[in-house]
Image: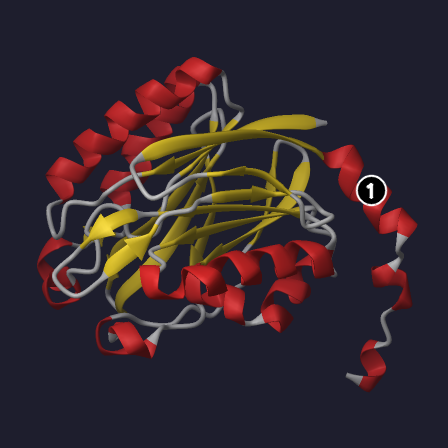
Amino acid sequence: MKWKIACIQLDIAYGQPALNYQAVAEKIKEAVKSGPDVIVLPELWTTGYDLTRLEEIADDQAERTILFLSEIAKNYHIHIIGGSVAKKTADGVFNTLLIIDNQGRLVKEYDKLHLFKLMNEHHFLQPGKKDGLFQLGGKLCAGFICYDIRFPEWIRTHTSKGAEAIFVVAEWPKPRLAHWRTLLISRAIENQCYVIAANRIGSDPANEFAGHSLIIDPWGDIIAEAGNREEIVTGMIDFDKTAEVRGMIPVFQDRRPEFY
């Protein structure tokens, strides 16, 4: 099975959801011209890191965003890795990844497990408690959010259960661009799977962001990489290659988790 991927790398209007919904609708309209099977959006694309105002601007139960993405998915018959949104609940606000299939159905919500204290997430967001595994188009995949990629044991928890592709949505800062690229390539090599990562570009009052959204194959080779501007990066992934690489170097068969 092959999928054409389109990662939408965009600047995010700080704390202005209405502008961001409009911008994403326009970007998706542009992206579908290349005929993708899957579109990927970045982290917190509705609000950016306007954390102090989340009680005011977060999406209640993510209902508006789910409806918005579901309609787009149905209209264009595409799967959408819907980035993440600030989701307001009775238990607080979560940084939530949304997965919508090409019928417009919500197939997964994943709340960011690892909150990034350097950007004060722990003061305004609640940590997740569930995994990021999901079935999409007959394939087992997994979704993660930004800081999660620094925890290889969390990624391996998913790939050891059979995930063949991992999707990462992020607002990764520019000063640590080298870490972004190295960590993602490492996650692809050690898990022998595709890594598809959508980062934002631009800046907010406290941060400048790195861009460089990536599509990486199970050998760790880069299929496609964005630069440091708004753009749509596309690439083809072939799940036969995942099986081939895992067969050549049988990492998962040779694991000895009883000693870990």
Left or right? Give the position of 242 relative to 165: right
Please state which amino acid type lies under the numbered disc 1.
Answer: Ala
Left or right? Give the position of 56 relative to 247: left
Q: Quadrant of the C terminus?
A: bottom right
Whether residue 28 is visible here, answered yes or no, is yes
Left or right? Give the position of 104 relative to 255: left
Q: Is residue 131 above or below residue 232?
A: below
Give percent across and percent down for residue 30: 33, 19
Residue at 20%, 35% (x, y): give it.
21
Give percent across and percent down for residue 202: 23, 48
Q: Is residue 9 above or below residue 185?
A: above
Residue at 18%, 30% (x, y): give it.
22
Give percent across and percent down for residue 182: 56, 61
Q: Quadrant of the N terminus?
A: top right
Whether residue 112 is visible here, answered yes or no, is no
Left or right? Give the position of 211 relative to 22: right
Give percent across and percent down for residue 145: 43, 58
Compare residues 216 and 44 and report the one nearer the observer: 216
Image color mode: secondary structure
Compare residues 231 and 49 and report the one nearer the observer: 231
Q: From this viewpoint, which residue is outermost toward the bottom? A: 259
Residue at 72%, 61% (x, y): give it.
190
**Crowd class of label 1 (few under 14; some 14 to 19; many from 20; radius 10 Å):** some
Q: Which picture quadrant has residue 49?
A: bottom left
Compare residues 39 and 184 and report the one nearer the observer: 184
Residue at 79%, 34% (x, y): give it.
240
Q: Which picture quadrant has residue 73?
A: top left
Residue named by callout 1: 243
Q: Is residue 257 above or below residue 92?
A: below
What secondary structure is found at the residue carrying circle 1?
A: helix
